[in-house]
Image (tube, rainbow, N blue to C red):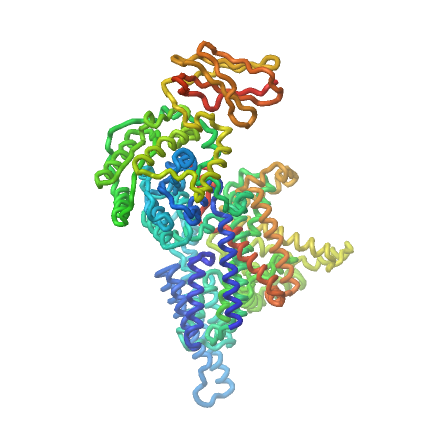
């Protein structure tokens, strides 16, 4: 049951109905039942993996908290107090480690076992040891809920959070169905209370939720699933295409992945809004970013945030890195030396971001591609800015901003070739082909574009749809609240907009069984 | 409360818009016809003599308005192309709502297919107005094809499948389909102008092929329905070139089975001679007559029905004025494609062979047509049409002639000629076979 299936909408409708019928104190139970049912329908017995992670995280959280808040026995001298605190910290750290290893272990085993085993086998080929390849099924959303669980335990360890006392409620936090499939990766303090709270039925909120879903569906069905055809074609046999078509394919893929991912996110957020629950924003007009660093603050925000709070800061502020920095200052001088901790942390963050996307070297490359630009920014950012000022370019001028946006978009799309290519080798091959033929623009006029799996009408539609997307995103960028603005318009206009949206998705969406004109019209007799 | 009313209004309007939008996407092209057929049964005020139910083995053969013109009988087709055999019963159910006492003629041809293909199922279901009958039809199709509940949805809401033809719609999709001009006559271009020699595919056989269990189940269901509802029925098959003995055998077996159950069966599959059909000129493909064949078929079948069932001649009854209008309209449509004696059902003799149209030479202001003479011909009539106009009798020549000079022609026009051998029997002219496409030239 995907987000874009009829069953899903019927499911949401059913859950909504029950949710607002039952006494409000049971609402969270409805969501829990709905979430586990959703998980069961999608993954059947793999739900046990989720359940195991939930129980581990729940118990770990409680254990850490108990140790952390244990009162000392009797009066303690300041020295004893210090030792007591150190001891508590040590013990809670151990518990945390166990919890993290268990949760992460499940993720690493299920998602990365074959990747690791394969690479290990390559290395150990000569010694005659071989790890068998396993046919592992990946539980739905494991990459998301594992990070969510880690954050929960670490936050308790850091004393920022009190653990949940009710396993049932915590199960809901870990399994909430709109977000389990593809995030956002929630933090407990942001989401949990909303999930457990009682919500009154609110008609306006319901309509807002549905509107957001509709916009998500538009992005997913009209744009992403349509542009998927040329993307599949180009990436499927990239060697047959002119380099610029390959690059065009990369741009199309950039649009596809954005509309697909953020569209799904809008559906998730829309569904949650119906229940009165506000999920965190995961995308903030990423293509308006002016640097790669800014891009990652706008793209998959909750992943970036997670990496910042649980990888980047802990690493760059760690003793180990502080020592490294000291040594580096001696070796390279102070200005470079102080940059070493953030540089190394960034490197690790983007290595992890890459690996998180999938168990393959191409994702590692994808992560490092992004990391490289960000690290370059840290290293040479000041020099770059000075150079810009020397050239007399106004930092906030429209032309400069446009240039920055364009440059960032291009770097992103280019890097995505790693992620979308068949493998690291073929991705590099594709990148090479782009540079080889950069001067030849004949593909624009020789009709190759219509041979990419879409006819002219579909391209025109795509251009309109992407134009609309840019327009809407630019309104978001200006912090214009579209749904609120629309709700103040005259009824006729408002309804017209709604009907247009509904029929646009219905008609122009790529969905439903295949219609092939051949069998329906042209070969009737 | 106010919100509730507003929401209800929103959804009501949405439903109306939805059904309008959906009707745009229904596959139309040749199926303009389907809409007529399905809706005609809602609109026809007159009592229908017979309802002729089947697939494309019905409408390219039987032309209702010609049946009216010649015999004054009202026999309306209720058929969609490749309509699955399982739908016959539900077509009858639908037609009985407005014409409970009609004679029900079922064409058994579609029993050649065992399953139901999706496009055929859509054509059968899409234009049928919503009713329990439609639900039953969809369920029956689903059961035969092992559809699940979700698969069925596309037959209630065809937009599920057809929305993706948004880039393939034409102006005719956006027009309201209300005019019913032809009484369900098939007026597709292929039917009017295509001529295919199907001699190679024509097979005769007395074989009886075993009927599969699945087919038998559908057939039994249909026969049980007829028995239970005490319908007046006739089962027929159409003259077709089925290609293999096995297929002819299957048809024979189906006919025998129905006969054994005590019903009237008219198996016309190989009755080409009886119907006067010419395998070389009267079909547009192996399974369908073209206009020349359907003129002959309607002439023969109308006579059969009138005589066998004593159907009254209602010509002149003002209640049936719409049928006269349909005839006038239809005559206009077919005139450019047919010769006057075909439309008047003159006597025909297929033993008089087609004169080969040897040449059409262009010289001065004249075109000269030459043909090879035909054994036993008592003379020839020469027909001509200019451009896309109607065929007109140009001249009659005696049996010795084998060429004709057509003088004083306008240059730049396209002239088409054909030659028909004739025999005079007293006042009556008997017409032989001919090339309906004729021979053409553009006058220099």
- Depth check: B412 or A171 in front? B412
* Residue A199 picture location, percent across and down: 48, 75
The residue positioned 27% from the left and 43% from the top of the image is B219
The one of B1 and B411 positioned closer to us in this rendering: B411
Residue A134 visible: no
Asked if B361 appears above or below A347 in the picture, the reply is: above
Residue at position x 49%, y 80% in the image:
A85
Name the quadrant of the C terminus of chain A: top left
Q: Can the viewer see residue B224 in this picture?
A: yes
Q: Is residue B360 above or below residue B162?
A: above
* Along the line of sight, the residue nearer the viewer: A226 or A334: A226
Horizontal side, residue B337 vs residue A130: left or right: right
Where's residue A257, x and y in %? 54, 53
Q: Position of residue A507 (x, y in %)?
A: 52, 51
Quadrant of the image for the N terminus of chain A?
bottom left
Looking at this view, name the residue that lies furthest to the bottom: A75
Splitting the image into 4 quarters, where does residue B286 fall?
top left
**Residue A378 place in picture, x, y as percent:** 64, 60
The residue positioned 57% from the left and 40% from the top of the image is A450
């Amino acid at each position: 049951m995907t987000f874009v299936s009829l069953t899903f909408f019927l499911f949401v409708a059913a859950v909504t109905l029950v949710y607002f019928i039952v006494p409000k104190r049971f609402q969270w139970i409805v969501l829990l039942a709905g979430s586990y049912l959703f998980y069961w329908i999608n993954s059947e017995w793999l739900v046990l993996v989720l359940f195991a992670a939930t129980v581990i995280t729940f118990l770990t959280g409680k254990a850490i908290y108990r140790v952390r808040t244990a009162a000392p026995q009797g009066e303690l001298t300041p020295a004893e107090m210090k030792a007591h605190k150190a001891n508590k910290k040590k013990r809670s750290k151990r518990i945390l480690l166990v919890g993290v290893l268990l949760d992460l272990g499940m993720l690493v085993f299920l998602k990365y076992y074959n990747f690791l085993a394969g690479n290990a086998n390559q290395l150990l080929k000569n010694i005659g040891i071989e790890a068998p390849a396993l046919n592992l099924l990946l539980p739905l959303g494991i990459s998301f809920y594992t990070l969510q669980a880690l954050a929960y335990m670490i936050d308790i360890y850091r004393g920022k959070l009190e653990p949940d006392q009710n396993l049932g409620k915590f199960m809901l936090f870990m399994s909430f169905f709109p977000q389990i499939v593809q995030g956002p990766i929630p933090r407990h303090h942001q989401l949990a209370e909303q999930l457990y709270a009682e919500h009154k039925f609110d008609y306006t909120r319901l309509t807002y939720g549905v509107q957001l879903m509709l916009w998500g569906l538009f992005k997913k069905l009209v744009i992403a699933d349509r542009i998927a055809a040329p993307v599949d074609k180009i990436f499927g046999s990239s060697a047959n295409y002119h380099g610029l078509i390959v690059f065009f394919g990369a741009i199309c893929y950039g649009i596809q992945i954005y509309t697909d991912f953020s569209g799904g996110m809008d559906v998730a957020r829309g569904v949650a809004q119906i229940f009165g629950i506000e999920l965190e924003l995961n995308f903030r007009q990423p293509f308006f970013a002016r640097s790669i660093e800014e891009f990652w603050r706008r793209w998959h925000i909750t992943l970036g945030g997670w990496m910042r709070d649980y990888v980047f800061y802990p690493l760059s502020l760690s003793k180990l890195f502080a020592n490294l920095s000291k040594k580096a200052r001696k070796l390279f001088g102070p200005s470079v030396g102080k940059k070493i901790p953030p540089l190394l942390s960034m490197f690790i963050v983007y290595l992890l971001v890459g690996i998180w996307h999938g168990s393959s070297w191409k994702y590692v490359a994808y992560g490092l591609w992004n990391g490289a630009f960000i690290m370059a920014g840290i290293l040479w950012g000041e020099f770059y800015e000075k150079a810009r000022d020397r050239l007399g370019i106004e930092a906030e001028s429209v032309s400069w901003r446009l240039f920055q946006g364009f440059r960032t978009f291009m770097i992103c799309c280019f890097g995505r070739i790693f992620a979308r290519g068949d493998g690291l080798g073929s991705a590099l091959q594709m990148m090479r082909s782009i540079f080889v033929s950069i001067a030849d623009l004949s593909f624009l006029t020789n009709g190759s574009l219509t041979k990419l799996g879409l006819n002219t009408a579909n391209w025109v539609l795509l251009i309109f749809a992407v134009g609309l997307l840019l327009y809407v995103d630019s309104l978001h960028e200006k912090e214009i609240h579209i749904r609120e603005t629309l709700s103040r318009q005259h009824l006729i206009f408002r309804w017209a907009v709604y009907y247009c949206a509904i029929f646009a998705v219905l008609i122009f969406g790529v969905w439903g069984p295949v219609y092939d004109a051949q069998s329906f019209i042209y070969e009737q007799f | 409360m106010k919100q509730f009313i507003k929401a209800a209004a929103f959804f009501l309007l949405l439903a109306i818009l939805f059904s309008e939008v959906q009707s745009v996407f229904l596959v139309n092209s040749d199926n303009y016809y389907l809409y007529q057929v399905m809706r005609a049964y809602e609109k026809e005020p007159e009592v229908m003599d017979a309802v002729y139910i089947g697939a494309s083995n019905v409408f390219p053969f039987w032309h209702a308005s010609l049946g009216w013109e010649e015999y004054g009988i009202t026999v309306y087709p209720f058929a969609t192309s490749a309509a699955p055999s399982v739908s016959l019963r539900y077509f009858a159910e639908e037609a009985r709502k407005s014409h409970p006492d009609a004679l029900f003629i079922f064409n058994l041809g579609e029993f050649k297919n065992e399953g139901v293909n999706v496009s055929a199922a859509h054509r059968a279901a899409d234009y049928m107005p919503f009713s329990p009958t439609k639900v039953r039809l969809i369920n029956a199709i689903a059961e035969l094809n092992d559809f699940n509940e979700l698969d069925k949805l596309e037959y209630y809401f065809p937009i599920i499948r057809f929305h993706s033809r948004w880039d393939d719609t034409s102006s005719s999709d956006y027009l309201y389909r209300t005019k019913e001009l032809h009484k369900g006559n098939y007026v597709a271009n292929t039917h009017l102008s295509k001529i295919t020699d199907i001699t190679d595919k024509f097979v005769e056989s007395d074989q009886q092929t075993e009927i599969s269990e699945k087919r038998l189940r559908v057939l039994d269901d249909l026969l049980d329905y007829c028995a239970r509802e005490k319908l007046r029925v006739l089962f027929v098959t159409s003259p077709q070139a089925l290609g293999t003995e096995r297929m002819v055998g299957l048809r024979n077996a189906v006919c025998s089975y129905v006969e054994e159950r005590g019903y009237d069966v008219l198996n016309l599959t190989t009755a080409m001679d009886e119907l006067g059909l010419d395998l070389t000129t009267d079909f547009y493909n192996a399974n369908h007559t073209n206009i020349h064949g359907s003129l002959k078929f309607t002439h023969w079948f109308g006579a059969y029905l009138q005589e066998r069932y004593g159907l009254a001649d209602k010509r002149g009854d003002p209640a049936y004025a719409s049928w006269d209008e349909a005839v006038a309209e239809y005559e206009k449509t077919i005139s450019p494609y047919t010769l006057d004696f075909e439309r008047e059902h003159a006597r025909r003799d297929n033993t008089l062979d087609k004169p080969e149209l040897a040449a059409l030479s262009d010289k001065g202001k004249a075109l000269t047509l030459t043909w090879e003479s035909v054994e036993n011909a008592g003379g020839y009539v020469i027909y001509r049409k200019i451009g896309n106009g109607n065929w007109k009798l140009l001249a009659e020549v005696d049996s010795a002639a084998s060429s004709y000079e057509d003088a004083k022609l306008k240059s730049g026009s396209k002239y088409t000629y054909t030659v028909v051998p004739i025999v005079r029997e007293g006042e009556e002219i008997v017409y032989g076979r001919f090339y309906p496409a004729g021979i053409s030239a553009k006058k220099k």
